[in-house]
Image: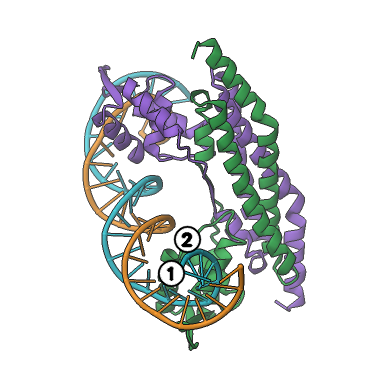
Chain colours: A purple, B green, C orange, D cyan
Amino acid sequence: MDVKTVCLGMLSDGEASGYDLKKQFQSTFAHFFAAGYGSIYPALSALAKEGLVACREVAQDGKPDRKVYRITDAGLAHFRETLKNPDTSHKVRSGFLATMVFAHLMSPEQIDAVIQSRLADIDRDLELIRQFENTCSANSTPGMRYVCGCGKTMMHAMKKYIAENRGGLVECDHRERTASGI
Amino acid sequence: MDVKTVCLGMLSDGEASGYDLKKQFQSTFAHFFAAGYGSIYPALSALAKEGLVACREVAQDGKPDRKVYRITDAGLAHFRETLKNPDTSHKVRSGFLATMVFAHLMSPEQIDAVIQSRLADIDRDLELIRQFENTCSANSTPGMRYVCGCGKTMMHAMKKYIAENRGGLVECDHRERTASGI
DNA sequence: CGCAACATGTAAGCGGTTACATGATTAC
DNA sequence: GTAATCATGTAACCGCTTACATGTTGCG
């Protein structure tokens, strides 16, 4: 599932500009699918060229013209077709865990700094979902609710794990380093 | 944290060949950091050129020579330095969740197929960790145990969420589609 | 006065994936 | 016989990130 396909899917829910889609990537999609302008704008251009979306330019005073994209019948059909061969991948790339593997080479202070940073990031993502649920939950799809719920569950599970296992990491590390005379 | 840095870190735990490191990426690291030969071999070459690792060629009969890499003092110092500016990122790229967002465009059968596929993948990763814990747990580092524990926690949390929320997704989807006369 | 939000785009570059290339041995 | 394991590497490609480019409005 690439950025282009996700953009097409987002547009199946209603028309939007690239700027609007970016906001969606940064709120509801943030915890499982990132995308920047450098991916979104070219994706929309390609989609338009293929006739999967139609573009309407809306003039604005002071601001640049808004390019509002709407999915076409062909686009919706194409998206449904894509879903028949669904992407079930779920890839995690964690610098946090890759760092923690080598906790025995770090001081307890360094370890705690990493943990705090991770915890702050989780809280940021959690807050994003909370905000969405407080404003758009009523008119959101069951899928969107499911995905947000999954994100919340995973993030709470990670927070809990981090809180409960700091000791085993920092103290064990300390003991081992003391034992080896470092 | 790129593949090169992780390889250097892995070598801080003992010497290994590129082939050995690949096996580690496919077992313990599989749930949070993927890497293929196409990244590993060039990474080791670069590391050797920079003097951070030393290479020893071991002749074998029938098989190609093994290139066994060992971290140098400069390499260990460099790795410790890297850890002083730690990577705390944790990125998820989920085709599974991106697909689920659009569950209302899929049939219950399609949704179930996606769920089953995801569940099977989780079980595969869980089995990998279980295997590791049954064989190497004794001589593993606290960091490695922490990371495996985190993986297990997250994967169990996801399995539980998927099991408990299938209804809200499939049935709601069904109701909505029925309501709209599809 | 400066920063955030609004709004769109391009282009270079980077890091990683995939496919290709080679070849013996062992187990089913 | 055929698949898996052992073992190394290259090269093309692809998708995404980052930086650059431009300009107004409104808020604190």
Looking at the image, which residue is at 49% across and 40% down?
B95
Please say whether residue B23 is visible from this viewpoint: yes
Q: Is residue B163 placed above or below B14 in the rendered structure?
A: above
Q: Dots 2 and 1: beta carbons under 8 Å?
A: yes
In whole angstroms, how far apart are the C-alphas of marks 2 and 1?
9 Å
Looking at the image, which residue is at 57% across and 42% down?
B117
**The numbered mark 1 sits on a residue in which chain?**
B
> On the image, which quarter does residue B16 sit in?
bottom right
Front residue of A162/D3: it is: D3
Q: Secondary structure at mark 1?
A: helix
In the picture of the structure, the residue carrying the numbered disc 1 is B43
Q: Is residue B157 placed above or below A80 in the rendered structure?
A: below
Q: Is residue A57 left or right of residue D6?
A: left
Report the amino acid beneath label 2: Asp
Q: Are marks 2 and 1 on the same chain?
A: yes
Q: Residue B6 in the image: x percent, y percent? A: 53, 65
Looking at the image, which residue is at 60% across and 77% down?
B14
Looking at the image, which residue is at 67% across and 58% down?
B129
> On the image, which quarter does residue D12 sit in?
bottom left
> On the image, which quarter does residue B143 sit in?
bottom right
Please say whether residue A72 is visible from this viewpoint: no
In the picture of the structure, the residue carrying the numbered disc 2 is B2
Q: Is residue B70 left or right of residue C5?
A: right
Q: Residue A61 in the image: x percent, y percent? A: 26, 17
**The numbered mark 2 sits on a residue in which chain?**
B
Q: Residue C28 in the image: x percent, y percent? A: 61, 68
Of the image marks 2 and 1, the number of the one nearer the N terminus? 2
Report the amino acid beneath label 1: Ala
Q: Secondary structure at mark 2?
A: loop
